[in-house]
Amino acid sequence: MVNCCGLITANKDPVPLKSIEVELEVRDHVATVVSTLNYENKEDKPLEAVFVFPLPGDAAVCHFSAQIGQTQIVAEVKEKQKAREEYDDALSSGQQAFLLEESEQSPDIFSLSVGSLPPGESASIRLDYVTELAVQADDGLRFCLPAVLNPRYQPLGSGGSGGSGGVQVTSVPASLVPYSLSFSARVSSPRPISKVESSCSLDPLQYLNSDQTQATIKLAAGHKFDRDVELLIYYKDAHQPTAVVEAGQASAEPGSLMGDPVVMVSLYPEFPQSVMSSVASCGEFVFLLDRSGSMGCPINNSKQQETRISSARDTLLLLLKSLPMGCYFNIYSFGSSYEHIFPKSVEYSQQTMEEALKKVGEMGANLGGTEILSPLQHIYSQSCIPSQPRQLFVFTDGEVGNTKQVLDLVKKNSGSHRCFSFGIGEGSSSALINGLAKEGGGHAQFITGTDRMQPKVMQSLRFALQPAVVDISVTWDLPKGVSVTVLSPPITALFQGQRSLIYAQLTGQSPKAAEGCVTVKYSLAGHPSQNQLRFSLKPAEDTGSTVHRLGARTLIRSLEMEERERRGQPDGGLKEKVVQLSVQSGVSSSFTAFIAVNKADGEAIQGPLVRRNIPISRMCIVKGKRRKRNLCDGPEMKMAFGVLRGLDLCGGAPTTVIPKQPPRDPLLQLVSLQQASGCWLLDPALSAALGKTSEEVDKSKPAPVNSDVWATVLALIWLHGFKKDAKEEWELLAMKAASWLRSQNAPCLTECVEAGNALLGCSMQKDVLGL
């Protein structure tokens, strides 16, 4: 259960965090982030401030320091309990101390304790981390600076004292967050930078050289820290495999991870076009939809009418219409409890599709909290259907506190399915969304800003309909005397055009100008294939320790998961290995913390320190008004939120606010009329969706043509003629419709297409329609 604390009013208890400065450096697909948090104690007594904040789930925190006046204190990584004891001892001795620790429940939440800050004193905290940038479906590299920490729902019995590993989380309306943000980025790559996009307003991209391989970007003036800062970076010829070798640290012990060179290999498998053009006609498709209270929030700040749950309903319509005949499917929804439409997955047919769509249309954000573990356990308890590979699609805004427990369950069942995950709205947990896909051998997508959910989800359905890549193996060919220790877990999934990263430690002396080679072998649709990359063993310049830290982070996460799997059993000292690796590399883990103590003389503190919790922004607006809702998404939770300027930010039980429904999207109106087989029926509803009367449609039909064939041709012409910009959303269902038409062996198709063009005012050719 979430342990929420009361809001602190701006009048009575000033918040000491004044501003945040963020500098981002992107080199190809790796980001280094330097954040500076500026504090000031305006009270008349010593202060302990606690700031709970999100970071990307796969970030490797690698530096933490504090500047107080002219004194700089650099933190050390120590075993977590020792660090906490040292922090408490320092405070009781009157010394200033700083403690940074990762949540025990979710690796993307950190808490920073600023201890014994004297009256009138200022402090600047610097936090550095490195992270890989995920490749999106449109080949953009995504960086996200989370501004929103949604209170995480911690189910009873899942362990931990709160959604932040025992740390209390405070939320306030974004407009009242009392600190400011400045943000700038520098991007460099071997390939030209074609563009940088963002959900926030940016100043124009400034190129630093003529070949456009270096550029700077920053937020436009007036940015309010009311949303995640998301950057999408696009390179020309992005799908180029690369390898970066980083030299070991001279000060580190030879043979250790930090003392040896480490290589980061980035692979982009390219599959034969003949295989990629085929679409699977089988599979068990299980859709798991979040219906917690927060799914009633707007999906973005500009379209207040469209909520997360309404967008998810529209997406499920497209998914169900695009499924192939002969497959199986089921739909689960969850909150504090979970429901399923069918007791077990059923064969896809007109009857089962209609029954499912009726239930989907009734779904609201009214199931309370966000307990995803139980429905997942139920799904995995269902026997798989022979010759129907299971594909799991998870839609959630990611407000889950027991992330590690959920990911452990997905990994345990990874051999039985592929998992495709979708983070909806601001503040969704990158650790949860990316982790579900990584452990489930699938693909992750984030829907934020003005994104439409549908094209991203349909891209993942295309991945799910690709043949599964099996028998994946990685082999290394290195000079004599050089050995390799792979730091990354085995590759379990490959998708067309999607990057696979491998980190490896290289031990031994390599001759000058030596080369290495890494080969990935796999089987696709029964055909053995391989991709190979040759690379120089000469270390790259100016990479610092970035590759080493990312490699250490990768190994740390694998060891942590293995330790959780073996908890209560002999584990060969896995926890000790994690602590040793974390301390050696200076990279955070769930078993360690950063501790910094100002050893200057101090007087012992008389009485307790005043403790302040720093608010995190939280936005949820419906119809232009702040929505009265339970921020912790659960009817059984005891809330201790205060009242800020007379505004009640939390209601009792969760409320379902149903906004006035906007007119139905014409595309979705047409799609909703398609039959499971792929065809459309000739009826007044179709004529209305096409913008014609029934008389006009009937009159234009060529005499020898079957009514359903005529209706289906018209629907395809309308899609190609008027919704070409949304082709990603309807392409799969159009392929199904074209396949149905071919199966009819219908006469006069050319005449039919010409008549349809004349009726709808289009100029489509028959081959464009896939006929």
Image: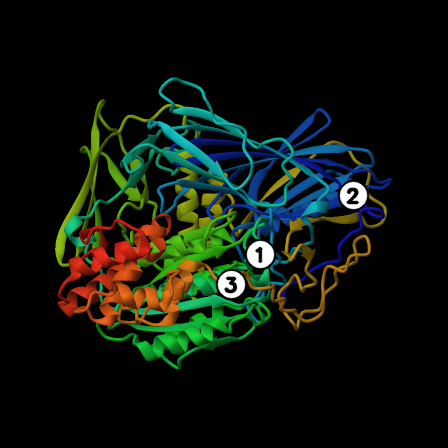
Which residue occupies the foreground of this view, 376 or 753?
Answer: 753
Task: Give the numbered dot on residue 192.
Answer: none
Amino acid at dot 1: Pro
Q: Are marks 2 and 3 in contact (CB under 8 Å)?
A: no
Determine the residue positioned at 42% across, 75% down: 378
Which residue occupies the foreground of this view, 685 or 198?
Answer: 685
Determine the residue positioned at 19% across, 48% down: 271
Q: Which residue is mark 2?
A: 47
- Please tell me which of labels 1 and 3 falls first in the chain: 1
Secondary structure of residue under mark 2: strand
Secondary structure of residue under mark 3: helix
Which residue occupies the foreground of this view, 729 or 768?
Answer: 768
Mark 3 Cα within 10 Å, few/some/many (few <14, many 20+)? Answer: many
Q: In this figure, what is the number of numbered marks?
A: 3
Where 389 sits versus 432, above or below? below
Residue 471 percent location from the top left of the image: 20, 56
Measure the C-alpha gap from mark 2 to mark 1.
Answer: 37 Å
Q: Which residue is mark 3?
A: 310
- Please tell me which of labels 2 and 3 falls first in the chain: 2
Residue 32 percent location from the top left of the image: 48, 34
Work out which residue is located at the far top of the displayed protein and give it. 210
| Image quarter of the C terminus | bottom left
Question: In the rendered view, does 470 fall on the left or right side of 308?
Answer: left
Q: Which residue is mark 1?
A: 298
Residue 246, quarter of the rendered image: top left
Determine the residue positioned at 47% across, 52% down: 447
**Which is in the foreground here, disc 2 or disc 1?**
1
Q: Are marks 2 and 1 in contact (CB under 8 Å)?
A: no
Determine the residue positioned at 69% across, 57% down: 626
Question: In the rendered view, does 625 fall on the left or right side of 692?
Answer: right
Which residue occupies the foreground of this view, 744 or 12?
Answer: 744
